[in-house]
Amino acid sequence: MRIFLANAPSIISAKNIKQVTADLPAGWFVRIHRSYVINTRYITSYSTSGNDWIVQLNGTLEARVSRQYKPIIKKILAL
């Protein structure tokens, strides 16, 4: 698993995404896809195209939101 950091090089971990998510502070990090966990404090914007949702993080990274996790991200974004 690769972990992208805001101001440092990425880290490669032998843990799976479920194990890493369990170690993160609750409320700051949310799973939005089976492949993505994001820090909600770094969401700068989002966009939609039909049923597809994309979350922008600090303007440089973006992550797709899966159908399963759309209700969670809508709640975070207060939509």
Image: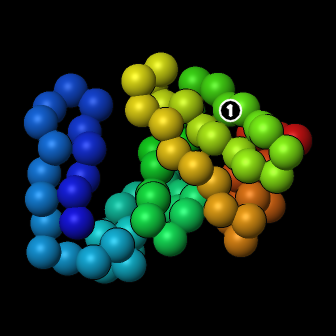
Look at the image and tell me whether residue 33 can be seen: yes
User: For this rendering, which residue is in front, 31 or 64?
Assistant: 64
Asked if residue 4 is positioned above or below residue 36 in the image, the reply reads above
Q: Position of residue 77 (x, y in %)?
A: 75, 40
Name the residue located 82 percent from the left edge and 52 percent from the top edge: 51
Image location of residue 47, percent across then percent down: 72, 32
Give the SS element for disc 1: strand
Residue at the outermost top position: 59
Tell me if mark 1 has few (under 14), some (14-19) or many (20+) residues whose alpha carbon lies within 10 angstroms of its own. some
Going by the image, does 77 lie left or right of 13? right
Q: Quadrant of residue 43?
A: top right
Residue 76 spot, x, y in % from top left: 72, 47
Q: Quadrant of residue 78?
A: top right
Numbered-mark total: 1
Q: Residue furthest front?
A: 50
Residue 63 relative to residue 75: left or right: left
Relative to 27, 68 lies left or right: right
The residue identified by callout 1 is 46
Whether residue 75 is visible here, answered yes or no, is no
Is residue 11 depicted above or below 71 in this figure?
above
Please provide percent x and percent y for residue 21: 38, 69
Residue type for callout 1 = Tyr
Quarter occupied by the N terminus: bottom left
Q: How is the image coloured?
A: rainbow
Name which residue lies at 74% across and 65% down.
67
